Image (cartoon, helix red, strand yellow):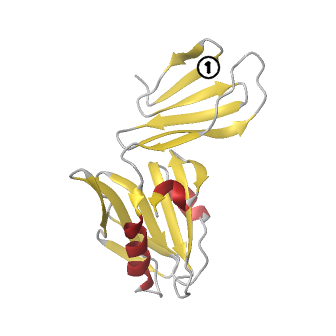
C-alpha cells in the first residue's frame, strides 16, 4: 500500500486506491486531500476546478476527541508572553484520555525556534513574541504533518493575536479559534 492514495469522487461513491496516510480526491469541484487518524479527520481543497462527470465534495474538519479546553489556550499564551525576546514552542498532546500542554526541549531566538517533537501531538503552538501573528514561509516549509498549527503574536499587548490552521501534509486550511478550543 502506498503512503498517498488517489481517488475519484464519482456519483456512485469513491473509487480508486486509498493510501496509508492520506488520499488525493478528484471531485466535481476540484482536487482535495483527505486524511484521518485517531485524533483528527479532514478533507481540504488543494485546487478548485470544475471537473465534469464527478460529484462535488465539501471541505470538512473534525476533532475526534472533542475540542481542546480553552484554559490550555490561555495558559499557552501566558507562558509565551513570559518571553518577549525570542520565539517559544508548546505542544498540545493527547495523553491518558485528555489534552495536555507540554513544553519540550527547545532553542529559541528572535525569529525562529527549534524543538523536540513529542509523540501524540495534536497541535503545534509557537510564538512571534512582539510581532503580529502570521504563518511565515518558514512555517509553511516546517509544518508538513497532519495536525493543527497555531501562532501567537503581539504578546506584549492586552489582546494578543492568534492564527490557527489545519495542516494536511503541506496543505493548509484556516481555522477559527472556536473550531479548535472550547471557549
The residue shown at (69%, 21%) is 55
Label 1, on which residue?
8
The residue shown at (57%, 35%) is 33
Check the image and name the residue furthest to the top: 12
29 in relation to 113, above or below: above
Number of marks in the rendered image: 1
Nearest the eye: 82 or 20: 82
Measured from the top left, where is residue 12 in percent x and y? 61, 11
Q: In this view, does 121 lie to the left or right of 48?
A: left
Q: Is residue 50 left or right of residue 60?
A: right
Measured from the top left, where is residue 137 in percent x and y? 61, 62
The residue shown at (29%, 71%) is 105
75 in relation to 3, above or below: below
Measured from the top left, where is residue 163 in percent x and y? 57, 65
Q: Is residue 6 left or right of residue 63?
A: right
Measured from the top left, where is residue 126 in percent x and y? 46, 69
Residue 75: image quadrant is bottom left
78 in relation to 183, above or below: below
Check the image and name the residue furthest to the front: 183
Residue 59: image quadrant is top right
The residue shown at (53%, 88%) is 156
Amino acid at each position: 500500500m502506498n503512503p498517498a492514495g488517489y481517488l475519484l469522487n464519482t456519483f456512485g461513491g469513491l473509487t480508486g486506491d486509498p493510501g496509508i496516510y492520506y488520499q488525493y480526491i478528484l471531485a466535481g469541484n476540484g482536487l482535495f486531500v483527505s486524511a484521518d487518524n485517531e485524533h483528527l479527520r479532514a478533507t481540504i481543497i488543494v485546487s478548485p476546478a470544475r471537473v465534469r462527470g464527478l460529484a462535488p465534495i465539501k471541505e470538512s474538519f473534525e476533532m475526534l476527541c472533542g475540542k481542546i479546553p480553552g484554559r490550555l489556550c490561555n495558559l499557552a499564551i501566558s507562558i509565551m508572553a513570559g518571553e518577549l525576546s525570542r520565539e517559544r514552542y508548546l505542544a498540545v498532546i493527547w495523553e491518558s484520555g485528555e489534552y495536555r500542554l507540554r513544553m519540550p526541549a527547545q532553542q529559541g531566538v528572535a525569529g525562529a525556534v527549534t524543538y523536540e517533537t513529542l509523540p501524540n501531538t495534536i497541535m503545534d503552538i509557537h510564538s512571534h513574541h512582539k510581532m503580529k501573528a502570521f504563518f511565515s514561509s518558514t512555517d509553511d516549509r516546517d509544518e508538513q504533518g497532519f495536525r493543527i498549527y497555531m501562532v501567537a503574536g503581539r504578546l506584549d499587548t492586552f489582546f494578543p493575536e492568534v492564527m490557527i490552521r489545519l495542516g494536511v501534509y503541506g496543505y493548509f486550511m484556516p481555522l477559527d479559534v472556536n473550531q479548535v478550543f472550547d471557549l
